[in-house]
Image (cartoon, rainbow, N blue to C red):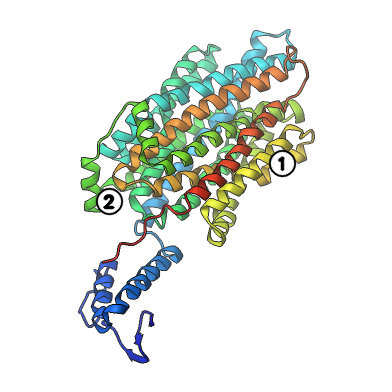
Amino acid sequence: MIDTDESMIQENGATFTPYTKDEENVSSEHYTDDDEHSLWIKNKDYLDQEDEDEFDDQYDNINSVKAATSIGRPKYFKDIILVFCLWSVMVMSAFIFSLFIPTMYSQYANYKHPNNTPQENQAIATHMKSITDASPLLMVFVFGPLIGVLSDKYGRKKIFMLNLTLLAIDVTCALISYKSENLVLFFIGHTVCGLTGANSAVVLSFISDLTTKEERPRVFAISGIALGTGIVIGPLMGGFAMKISTSAPLYLVYILVIIGFILLFFMKESTLLRSEEDKLKAKSAKKTINPFKSIIKLFGSSKYVAFVTCLYIVFSFTVEDVLTTMYYYTALRYGWGPVENSYNIAFLGAMVIIYSVFLLPMAIRRFSDRIVISISFLVSAIIRVVYAFAVNQYIWIACGFIGGMGSVILNLTQAIISKSTPPEIQGSILTGVVSVGSLANLAGALVTQNIYAYFISPKAPIYFPGAHFLIDSVPTFLTFIGSLLIWKFYPDTTPTTTKQ
């Protein structure tokens, strides 16, 4: 038997010192894992042939432990921080905008139907909102693969510039529609500018360019900090602006767009920082702008990726119930307005940060990303049952404390897909994931909001505002069962180190 560590090797009771990088005159500045590997290989000369296989196994194990336990910063840490800041700015803009839109619809419904009951007008407003929530997602599905191809070919920064420009146009259409009390321009502008929904795929592709497979799950999980910061600060800013006037939040979005362009100025293009091998693979990889081909490519990459993508799709459908009905649901049941909702959303953002920074990273180190995802699916299913019967506002708030992990889990699920995907097609595959996810979001936005609108209207057999939560608990629970089956039949998909 042999015993190896980083300073000596023992063989049959004899101890000797292996080669070191100093003896080989290897500059520490250029000392890489490949150099370390070559030095370890030279030490094999001291061993008998019968021990070489065991030596190789121990070498592979040491490398695996190093990769799994590494806590150092990624090489391009500064650029990752910048893209997280940009993402946070975009999330702030989205949530500020999200406070304005339902308020605009409520005022419009009350203006057009002054003789209706509040419940009837809210049902009308919810139905209109479901359409403008779904139509941008259709744009993401149709043009999402094109965005992925363009980001792979021309760079992530140019796509970020496009998205910021579209956001400014979207806000302008909303402002004109609100002032003119005509929603046609907003319907058109919000649909066309829905391409900004592909932001998350571009951000995750940017991160994938700059991280190793071992670093990726941890960095993707930490990306929840940017998401949570945006969710905390954005609604608070929007709620404060709402106290000034209904349209004031839109001017805040203009300011955030300018900040986004400033951040882009300092960011490097991630596709230029990839290894030469990855660049060559990216150039030779076949790309498609057909969303259906992109989906076929996604599901054809491997059975494991296909099954995990199914989990992502189902969960993307169910998370829409809280995101799209929260404003009207809390207004109807608890009498909350824009300001109270801004506080509630900010609280959820704080929980996303806590889960991203503390709870989920600790859970992943203690268990694994797979176990964390499965537990989160189960908890989310239970929380939806509680949401359905949350007649008290404090029950709703308590559910938010536990349910704040949902958005982070979607990122973690994407990380599992990413680390099982070749680097040359990261942008296309991740955008394909977002494309199918957008279809799930589209269906979720339409189905859950219209179920809610139906069960608060006079047409429903019973008055049950929480019906959509109870219904969504079923597919959410099925994602939990499905994840357990996937982990059972695909116990390990991470490539092992090839013996030299």
Q: Residue 437: percent from the left, percent from the top?
A: 47, 33
Amino acid under label 2?
Answer: Arg
Q: Nearer the viewer, residue 469 or 87?
A: 469
- Earlier residue among tags 2 and 1: 2
- What is the secondary structure assignment of the residue under circle 2? loop
Amino acid carrying label 1: it is Ile
Q: Is residue 110 above or below residue 470?
A: above
User: Can you name the residue that lies furthest to the front here?
Assistant: 50
- Kindly indicate whether the residue at mark 1 contacts the one at mark 2 (C-beta within 8 angstroms): no
Residue 226 can be seen, yes or no: no
Q: Position of residue 176 (x, y in %)?
A: 49, 17
The secondary structure type at the circle numbered 1 is: helix
Question: Height in image: 458 above or below 347?
Answer: above
Neighbour class for label 1 at 10 Å: few (<14), some, many (≥20)? some
| Left or right of 81 in this view: 18 | left
**In this picture, residue 188 sits left or right of residue 497:** right
**Image disc number at residue 265:** none
Quarter where residue 198 is shown: top left
Q: Which residue is mark 1?
A: 397
Residue behind mark 2: 274
